[in-house]
Amino acid sequence: MGSKIEIIEQSFAQIKPNAEKFAASFYVNLFTKYPEVKPLFVNTDMEKQQKKLLDALIL
Ligand code: HEM
């Protein structure tokens, strides 16, 4: 069984080919499950935000 780091790296490698779809679905899922956080993003450019999310995960 791999370490937690290996599990994270492997699961991220599976996401990577569809990274943009993943980033978009992240916010769809977030706002569906937690509609109360939507106001936090009222002034946010969601296209840029998706890129920032991915950049952070890649880092
Ligand atoms: C894996 C999880 C997450 C990652 C990697 C992540 C990463 C980031 C990054 C990189 C930024 C941009 C910071 C900047 O512009 O300097 C950001 C902004 C933000 N994040 Fe997250 N985030 C995550 C989860 C969440 C969740 C769950 C929420 C809400 C409950 C949230 C709320 C926000 C808000 C409100 C901003 C500011 C948006 C704006 O600039 O208008 N984040 N996040």
Image (cartoon, rainbow, N blue to C red):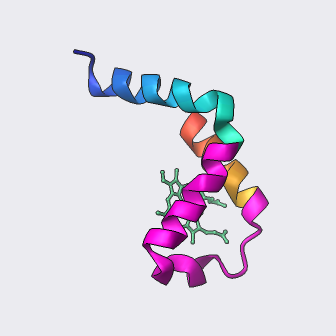
Residue shown at 68% from the left, 54% from the top: 50
x, y percent for residue 37: 50, 78
x, y percent for residue 59: 57, 35
x, y percent for residue 53: 61, 50
Q: Please name whichever residue, 30 or 5, is drawn nearer the observer in this view of the structure.
A: 30
Q: Please name whichever residue, 19 or 55, is drawn nearer the observer in this view of the structure.
A: 19
Residue shown at 54% from the left, 24% from the top: 13
Residue 9 is covered by the magenta coloring: no
Determine whether 21 is above or below 32 in the image: above
Residue 58 visible, this angle: yes
Determine whether 57 is above or below 12 in the image: below
- Magenta stretch, residue numbers: 21-47
Snapshot quadrant of residue 58: top right
Residue shown at 76% from the left, 57% from the top: 48
Residue found farthest to the left = 1
**Residue 32 falls left or right of residue 51:** left
Residue 59 visible, this angle: no
Determine whether 17 is above or below 41 in the image: above
Residue 38 is covered by the magenta coloring: yes
Residue found farthest to the top = 1
Determine whether 11 is above or below 47 in the image: above
Q: Quadrant of the N terminus?
A: top left
Q: Please name whichever residue, 25 or 55, is drawn nearer the observer in this view of the structure.
A: 25
Residue shown at 35% from the left, 25% from the top: 7
| Ligand 1 shown in quarter | bottom right
Q: Please name whichever residue, 44 or 31, is drawn nearer the observer in this view of the structure.
A: 31
Characterize the magenta stretch by its predominant secondary structure: helix
How many numbered circles are shown? 0
